[in-house]
């Protein structure tokens, strides 16, 4: 057992490292367009007085002799600059200089006082100023685009230009964001002047393009947007739809007019049959971004918009994500064969317990899994909403998820306690034999091993960033680097709340529910456990979107409690919970110790959570 397990772990460790290097190299090659685009990681003191983190993409055609159009890209709320990878890869590939920014209080940009989006969504204007000062950027051809809150940042940039008397921005594309349609008195107007402007509007947007009546809940959601006066006024350059002779206009058609001295000024609304976050990950959305800026600013290196390579970057990034998970498992197993930690290793590979022989035992197995899954599902939205309304901590959104995790972890512990007292103990469940009870010295060594595993595993993300300017991610599931301030944020209270859940989950999955139900080799058992652990993350989004697609209305929606936002956050959590269950099982089979993987995962996932979101600096 010893030699074979160690040999297998070495092989998987080598494979995991190879996968991460394939990811780093492959993603780097794609985002540099095979060496044609230079990437600079910047930390810039802005004119507004805060440090802004940004990545600058400079194609070889952009020189002081032949300056190229420049474009600022921005993420939305609770995200970071890397979420714009489809846009910066494809735009830089077509010869645009691209500045991908972290908004204040996001990513590695500086924290500023903030209570709402208006205060933090100021990065676009600062980005446009920065681009205008670069000698290889055509200062007359600067465009801006942002997703969601990033789109709002584009609007605030136009406001800032009006207030400051500047005109850096020539073109605006609002991605999953509303335009400014009316003035303070509610009259339709054209705030954008002679700038080209487009809206990338998704049919099933969860946050924008509503039609409100007298109540708090919208009368109509985004599927009806094109029929609204706001959309029609926008396409008519701010004209009032009640005016005689007003022209009704269509989506996906570019309209031109001569406005305030500007000739052939553009307005267009693109409509995509997708949801809000999918605009990050859509070939069609990326195609519209390319077409818009090619038409508006002119691409120095025209390439058909359907010719896209960013998907390869995402694929390589995902390979790195897989490699990182494999590294955590295999590295933990190999450390169990070192002299320092060998006492934590089981004498032989841990086999599943026999399946419960009686009906009561089977009922306990299935019943406890089902009750735990239902409990986690029922409490998710209200608990996350309560957490988000808490202003004591810097990341209310992380606190909401952590509070839910804590509640689920405590419920799991209570469930295991009741099971042990009423059935398990009388039917041979030995907590010491299953690794739940152990000497303090052994427990402390388990903690040390877990911290080492988590630290070394996360170090690979810094290697990717430092040497290749990449990270590991897939859509909204991301692992990125962080600065020292995030460690302090993560330590209290989020780490301890996540640890309760991931340790309790590991103990439950392995010490209590690892049996021959699902097959004598245990493969089916781990799938059963994984699906029940991830049940709320699978079911709640399914309920939301099946209902939305069928009725054009959202099932979970709230003006203040943001239920539609919390539902979205479950997409990456689904993958995390399933993967965590698998990692827990692999490490447990070698160690008969449910704490090692539980602690390591708690640390890594806390860092992921606190790095990929927003700071509220109340």
Image (cartoon, helix red, strand yellow):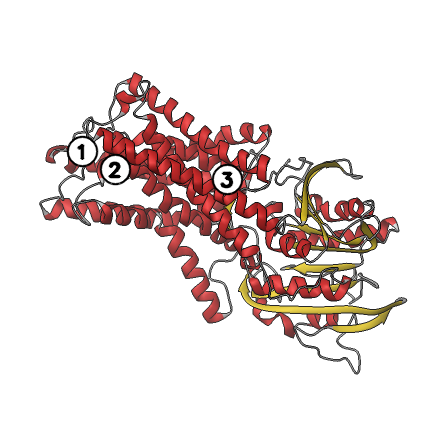
The residue tagged 3 is 609
Q: Is residue 554 left or right of residue 158?
A: left
Q: Nearer the viewer, residue 420 or 542?
A: 542
For residue 334, above or below residue 267:
above
Q: Are marks 2 and 3 in contact (CB under 8 Å)?
A: no
> Among all residues in the image, which is located at the extreme bottom?
245
The residue lying at 11 percent from left, 48 percent from top is 359
Query: Circles 1 and 3: CB distance less than 8 Å?
Result: no
Q: Residue at x 36, y 41 (%)?
A: 580
- First in residue order: circle 1 vs circle 2: 1
Q: Which residue is mark 1?
A: 421
**Which one is earlier in the sequence, the residue at label 2 or at label 3?**
2
- Provide the secondary structure element on which disc 1 rests: helix
Of badges 1 and 2, nearer the viewer stands 2
Q: Which numbered tag is attached to residue 169? A: none
The image position of residue 327, as x and y in percent, is 40, 36
Q: Is residue 558 left or right of residue 135?
A: left
Percent position (x, y) of residue 435? 24, 28
User: Is any atom of residue 494 visible in this view?
Assistant: no
Alpha-carbon span between mark 1 and mark 2? 18 Å
The residue pinned by badge 2 equals 510
Q: Residues within 10 Å of mark 3 (few under 14, many from 20)?
A: many
Dot 1: few (<14), some (14–19), or many (≥20) neighbours within 10 Å? few
Viewer-nearest residue: 251 or 34? 34
Image coordinates for residue 335, horizontal then vertical, percent = 34, 26
Residue 341 x/y as whole percent: 31, 21
């Amino acid at each position: 057992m010893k030699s074979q397990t160690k040999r297998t772990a070495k092989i998987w460790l080598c494979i995991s490292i190879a996968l991460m290097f394939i990811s780093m190299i492959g993603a780097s090659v794609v985002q540099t367009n095979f060496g044609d685009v230079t990437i600079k990681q910047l930390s810039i003191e802005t004119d507004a007085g805060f440090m802004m983190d940004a990545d600058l993409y400079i194609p070889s055609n952009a020189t002081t002799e032949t300056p190229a159009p420049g474009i600022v890209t921005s993420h939305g709320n609770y995200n970071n600059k890397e979420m714009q990878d489809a846009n910066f890869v494809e735009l830089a590939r077509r010869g645009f200089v691209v500045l991908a920014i972290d908004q204040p209080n996001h990513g590695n940009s500086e924290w500023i006082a903030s209570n709402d989006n208006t205060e933090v969504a100021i990065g676009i204007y600062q980005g446009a100023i920065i681009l205008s000062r670069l000698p290889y950027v055509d200062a007359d051809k600067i465009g801006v685009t942002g997703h969601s809150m990033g789109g709002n940042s584009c609007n605030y940039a136009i406001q800032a230009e009006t207030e400051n008397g500047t005109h850096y921005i020539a073109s605006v594309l609002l991605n999953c964001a509303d335009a400014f349609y009316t003035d303070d008195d509610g009259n339709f107007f054209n705030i954008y002047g002679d700038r080209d402007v487009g809206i990338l509007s998704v049919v099933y947007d969860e946050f924008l393009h509503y039609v409100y009546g007298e109540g708090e809940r919208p009368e109509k959601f985004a599927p009806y947007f094109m029929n609204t006066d706001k959309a029609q006024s926008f396409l008519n350059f701010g004209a009032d739809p009640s005016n005689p002779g007003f022209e009704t206009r269509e989506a996906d058609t570019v309209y031109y007019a001569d406005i305030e001295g500007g000739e052939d000024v553009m307005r267009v609304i693109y409509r995509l049959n997708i949801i809000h976050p999918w605009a990050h990950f859509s070939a069609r959305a990326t195609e519209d971004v390319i077409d818009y800026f090619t038409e508006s600013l002119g691409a120095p290196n025209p390439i058909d918009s359907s010719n896209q390579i960013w998907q390869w970057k995402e694929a390589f990034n995902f390979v790195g994500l897989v490699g990182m998970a494999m590294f955590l498992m295999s590295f933990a197993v190999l450390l169990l064969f070192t002299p320092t930690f060998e006492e934590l290793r089981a004498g032989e590979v841990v086999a599943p317990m026999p399946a419960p022989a009686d009906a009561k035992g089977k009922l306990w197995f299935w019943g406890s899994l089902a009750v735990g899954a239902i409990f986690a599902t029922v409490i998710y939205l209200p608990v996350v909403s309560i957490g988000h309304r808490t202003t004591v901590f810097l990341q209310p959104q992380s606190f909401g998820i952590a509070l839910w995790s804590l509640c689920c972890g405590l419920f799991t512990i209570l469930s295991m306690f009741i099971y042990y007292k009423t059935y398990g103990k009388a039917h041979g469940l030995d907590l010491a034999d299953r690794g739940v009870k152990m000497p303090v010295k052994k427990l402390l060594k388990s903690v040390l091993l877990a911290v080492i595993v988590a630290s070394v595993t996360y170090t690979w993300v810094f290697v990717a960033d430092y040497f290749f300017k990449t990270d590991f991610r897939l859509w909204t599931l991301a692992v990125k680097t962080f600065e020292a301030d995030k460690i302090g944020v993560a330590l209290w209270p989020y780490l301890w709340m996540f640890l309760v859940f991931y340790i309790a989950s590991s103990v439950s999955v392995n010490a209590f529910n690892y049996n021959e139900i699902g097959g004598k080799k245990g493969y089916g058992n781990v799938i059963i456990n994984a699906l029940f652990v991830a049940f709320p993350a699978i079911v709640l989004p399914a309920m939301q979107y099946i209902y939305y697609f069928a009725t054009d209305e959202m099932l979970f929606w709230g003006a203040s409690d943001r239920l539609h936002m919390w539902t979205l956050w479950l997409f990456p959590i689904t993958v995390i919970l399933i993967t965590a269950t698998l990692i827990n099982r692999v490490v447990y089979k070698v160690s008969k110790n449910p704490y090692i993987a539980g602690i390591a995962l708690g640390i890594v996932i806390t860092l992921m959570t606190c790095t990929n979101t927003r700071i509220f600096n109340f």
